[in-house]
Amino acid sequence: MNRVKKENDLQKRDDDDGSSSYLSKELVEEILLKLPTKSIPKLIVVSKLWSSIVRSKKFIDLYMKRSLTRPCFLFLFNRDDVQFYHSATQEAAAPCCYTCRLSSFPLSLIETRISSLSFNVSQPVHGFICCQDLDKVVVLNPSTGQVLVLPQVRTRRTQISRFFGYDSIRDEYKVLCMTVLQVSDEDEPVVSEEHQVFTLGVGKKKEATWRMIECKVPHCPATEGVCPKNGVVYYGAWSNSDKYGSVIVAFDVRLEEFTLVKLPLGVKINDSGSGLVSCQGKVALVNQNQSYHNKLNMWVLEDVDKPEWSKISVVVPFWDGLSGPEFFHCRGAISSDEFIFSPIYPTVRPFFIVSKEDIATRVEIEGLGDNFGFVIVLLDYAECPIFL
């Protein structure tokens, strides 16, 4: 009886405050902040104290502040119809070999084929990414392995554009979806309609529904979006206005307003090769088709209000002996002024190219095993402890 009573007392103490009898809450918090993000989900079952710490806004803010100073590559790949995610620091981009251990979470995202989602993935935004499969939108946290399938977009149309952003002031993630009524082959005006927003508030209860919003600047989305700085999502588009034509659209995540940004004279959005990338915290327009010809011109948006653009010409010197018959997309530039290129469909083994000035390095990604269907390389990912 004494032994049973003692065990019950120990259990009660653990349930009440975890390890607080031995360590202060502040010290426990400091220790937990140093743990890898993939360990965070396991901590909530240790004790009530630990659960309250890792779910608190203070802990999340401190953890994210550290993560944002240590941007990572995010590798997405599938194997045997299961999707995996792995992050690795961008600081080591120069070595010729990247070792990727299979320590990520297997995620069964949608009941349809995983590969149908995987090539329609947003750039990382404050620790989350967003995928789309027709009218089904998914938000997920690769660090914790959690997946949130959003309610079906309220439309009967099948052509949907999806963009993902974060508002640091209100601490809210938002998904913007819009539909296109028709697409014409004869350059007739085509505009987006049914602009809808879904809000995800961290630690807040939000109404789980799509809201219609107004767009006062008619346009049709033409590229994927980027959110290099919290608060604004940028994407390439076509405008019906004779004054603009090809434009960049800036969507203010907090105000839910659209602004058209005029491109430099003579620069147009190409429906097959143009794309937006993040270039050290700035938005850049690039014609991906140019990367097949050893030179790539990139227009960087220096000032949104003026607008003011600068032109960068990037040498792509990796065709001889580095890449083989691959077709590449530029994924953007990291803080070391290195440009990252990754193959669209790797034919032999996964790799990416790091290019700086006239020097290029092939970076092998090892440890993925066999039977992988694709590998996508995303930049500037911040590991995130937030629970969906």
Image: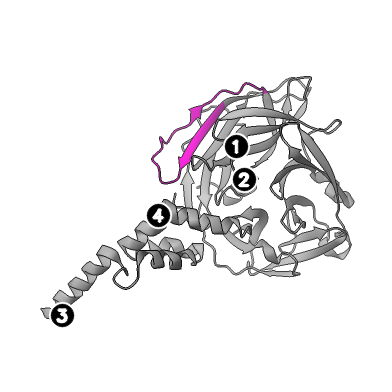
Query: Disc 1 on helix, strand or loop?
Result: strand
Q: Position of residue 57 (x, y in %)?
A: 43, 51
Sequence-first tag of 1 and 3: 3
Q: CA distance from mark 1 to mark 3?
A: 60 Å
Residue 214 vs 41, above or below: the answer is above
Q: Which mark is residue 55?
A: 4
Q: Earlier in the sequence, mark 4 or mark 2?
A: 4
Q: Residue at label 3?
A: 3
Residue 172, above or below 54: above
Q: Amino acid at mark 3?
A: Arg
The residue sitting at 52% across, 49% down in the picture is: 140
Q: CA distance from mark 1 to mark 2?
A: 9 Å
Magenta region, residue range: 195-218
**Quarter location, residue 362:** bottom right
| Circle 2 residues within 10 Å: few <14, some 14–19, many ≥20 | many
Query: Badge 3 local density, few (<14 within 10 Å), some, or many (20+)?
Result: few
| Nearer to us in this view, 243 or 209 | 243
Which residue, given by chain and number where applicable, does mark 2 sit on? 122
- Give the residue pinned by disc 1: 162
